[in-house]
């Protein structure tokens, strides 16, 4: 932690030069108002764990049905947010023009999305010209040998490679991709077959980690998919019935997947399907029985390969001779409406009020699992109920300051976006299609996504927040955030663990700040890490660390306060993530 500098010294260092500059340009408000830590702390104190919890137990309740984009639950959440902003006295900044001036819809920015739902998926394996096996899946058909997990590419054909567990992790001393490279096995345009999880001694003990706990390659399976997609594969075959962590049969999972396909919203985009660029390759979960049929020309079975790898803890990889895989997807398309929610506080300075500080968070989540026994609602308390209610509390703190005579000099936009879980759609619509405030007048974006739980690698640590972006676009914005953390007494550890273009998790591109950053707008993404309930039905509001969350929200408020009130906007000094 940086050494603490006495408060009075900060007042002298920050307040005096700004005061001289302000006096030479405009009479009021004086910079000592916003350079005074005691004043910022007064309004930070209005942000409390109790009020954050009061909002979150509503936003992440079953009544909002998982807030999936375009569904009733998402729209109910939009009305709740609009009603709260109306109650607080913020101006609506939506683009919808309702008949009544007090209608909640005045806060809405509606936009059209184009959906795709699966009708049928087929997987055909050939050995030369002979058919080895065929697998079909759709909303009205389930095969015990597998199902389509993800994917949108209509046609995907290529030869087959066995890639072990699909792990690339030098820290664990195990890397299937390094073995593929050493054997000169190219993955681009090929289908990759990988095993679920990782080398295990039994159902719960990893052979790769020092403590025997399963690594992130097991607890966060999307890492495997991301690694495969970065290699340019035509498709992925995940052998899923040999996972020791699987508690139901593959046939049961296939049946559940078929029902989800029938009832879910599906993929969404801002553009019609035919005009899209990249489309996700098909990712299938298959049985050992089917995998054995595909591997037959190699002379191996899945059981033999898994036993060999687990025993040696060394990768086994190879190209399967003569086998080609053909994947076909047939999908239906439709249009639907969703909406962002926008509220703003107009700035007081006649020269600066046309500039805007944007605070953003997505309020959508992933909906309902209709196949679940018992609770099937993905409440999304941390993701991103925490960011959603944080914006409400920050808005309330600023409005209290306004009532006390301390209106910010720049305008502040509170932007709740929809469609983040579908591909950052709401923020992309705002920045690329209909920015209510011109992007050239947008001085900073502070984005909040998941600030309520603990990263498993930091369990029990209540004194950190990950900051992503900051000095990679604007060194001054980074320093403002550090300075506010110190002088206002939040004293969090501002961890830059993921603040890199080389971060394999790519968190810098996985939330709504990305759509501001790509336009060169300085941003900071505030985040506390994924956890075991990420995108799960157990992401519930009673699991949130509200005390730590309140400290993070106070920090974000203080940073927004400084940016909204200082004479000059944070300059762009870095290349960003583009």
Image (cartoon, rainbow, N blue to C red):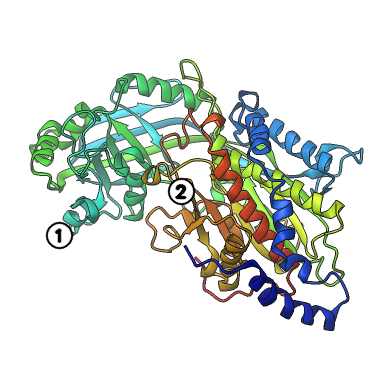
Q: Residue furthest top?
A: 373
Report if the CB atoms under discs 1 and 2 are less than 8 Å apart.
Answer: no
> Is residue 568 at least partly visible in the picture?
yes
Depicted 11 relative to depicted 108: above or below: below
Give how far across and how far down residue 219 sits, in percent: 34, 38
Coordinates of residue 19 in the picture (x, y in percent): 78, 77
Q: Does dot 1 land on a helix, a strand or a loop? A: helix
| Label 2, residues with CA under 10 Å away: few <14, some 14-19, many ≥20 | few
Badge 1: residue crowd in 10 Å (few <14, some 14–19, many ≥20): few
Disc 1/disc 2 C-alpha distance (Å)? 29 Å
Percent of width and height locating residue 243: 25, 30
Quarter of image, res 556: bottom right
**What label sits on residue 207 in the rendered view?**
none
Q: Residue at coordinates 89% horizontally, 39% vertically from top-left? A: 102
Along the line of sight, the residue nearer the viewer: 494 or 151: 494
Q: Name the residue under label 1.
A: 182
- Residue at left offset 56%, top offset 72%: 475
Q: In which image quadrant can residue 435 be found?
A: bottom right
């Amino acid at each position: 932690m940086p050494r603490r500098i006495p408060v009075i010294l900060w007042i002298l260092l920050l307040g005096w030069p700004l005061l001289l500059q302000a006096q030479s340009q405009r009479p009021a408000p004086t910079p000592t108002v916003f350079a005074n830590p005691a004043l910022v702390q007064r309004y930070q104190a209005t942000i409390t764990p109790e009020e954050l919890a009061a909002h979150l137990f509503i936003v992440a309740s079953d009544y909002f049905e998982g807030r999936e984009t375009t569904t009733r639950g998402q729209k109910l959440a939009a009305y709740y947010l609009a009603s709260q902003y109306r109650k607080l006295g913020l101006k609506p900044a939506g683009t919808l023009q309702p008949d009544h001036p007090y209608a909640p819809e005045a806060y809405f920015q509606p936009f059209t999305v184009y959906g795709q739902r699966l009708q049928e998926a087929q997987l055909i394996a050939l050995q030369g010209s002979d058919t080895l096996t065929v697998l079909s899946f759709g909303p009205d058909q389930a095969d015990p040998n597998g199902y389509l997990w993800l994917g949108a590419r209509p046609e995907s054909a290529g030869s087959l490679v066995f890639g072990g567990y699909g792990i690339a992790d030098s820290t664990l001393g195990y890397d299937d991709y390094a073995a593929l490279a050493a054997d000169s096995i190219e993955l681009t345009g090929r289908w990759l077959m990988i095993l679920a999880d990782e080398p295990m001694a039994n159902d719960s003990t990893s052979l790769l980690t020092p403590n025997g706990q399963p690594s992130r390659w097991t607890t966060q399976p999307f890492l495997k998919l991301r690694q495969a997609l970065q290699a340019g594969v035509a498709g992925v075959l995940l052998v899923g019935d040999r996972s020791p962590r699987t508690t139901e049969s593959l046939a049961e999972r296939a049946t559940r997947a078929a029902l989800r396909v029938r009832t879910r919203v599906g993929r969404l985009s801002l553009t019609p399907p035919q005009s899209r660029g990249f489309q996700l390759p098909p990712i299938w979960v298959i049985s050992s029985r089917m995998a054995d049929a595909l591997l037959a020309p190699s002379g191996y079975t899945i059981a033999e390969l898994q036993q060999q790898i687990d025993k040696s803890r060394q990768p086994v990889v190879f190209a399967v001779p003569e086998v080609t895989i053909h994947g076909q997807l047939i999908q239906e398309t439709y249009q639907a409406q969703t909406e962002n929610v926008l509220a703003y506080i107009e700035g007081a300075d006649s020269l600066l009020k046309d500039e805007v500080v944007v605070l953003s968070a997505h309020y959508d989540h992933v909906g309902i699992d209709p196949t679940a026994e018992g609770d099937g609602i993905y409440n999304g308390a941390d993701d991103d109920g925490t960011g959603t209610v944080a914006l409400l509390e920050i808005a309330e703190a600023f409005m209290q300051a306004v009532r006390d005579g301390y209106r910010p000099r720049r305008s502040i936009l509170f932007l709740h976006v929809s469609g983040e879980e579908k591909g950052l759609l709401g923020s992309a619509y705002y920045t690329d299609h209909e920015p209510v405030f011109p992007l050239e007048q947008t001085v900073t974006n502070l984005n909040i996504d998941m600030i309520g739980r603990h990263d498993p690698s930091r369990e029990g640590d209540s004194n950190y927040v990950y900051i992503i972006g900051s000095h990679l676009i604007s060194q001054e914005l980074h320093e403002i955030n550090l300075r506010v953390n110190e002088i206002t007494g939040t004293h969090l550890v501002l961890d830059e663990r993921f603040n890199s273009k080389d971060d394999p998790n790519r968190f810098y591109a996985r939330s709504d700040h990305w759509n501001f950053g790509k336009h060169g707008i300085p941003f900071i993404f505030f985040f506390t890490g994924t956890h075991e309930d990420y995108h799960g039905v157990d992401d519930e509001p009673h699991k949130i660390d509200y005390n730590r969350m309140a400290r993070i929200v106070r920090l974000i408020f203080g940073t927004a306060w400084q940016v909204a009130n200082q004479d000059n906007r944070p300059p762009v000094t870095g290349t960003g993530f583009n």
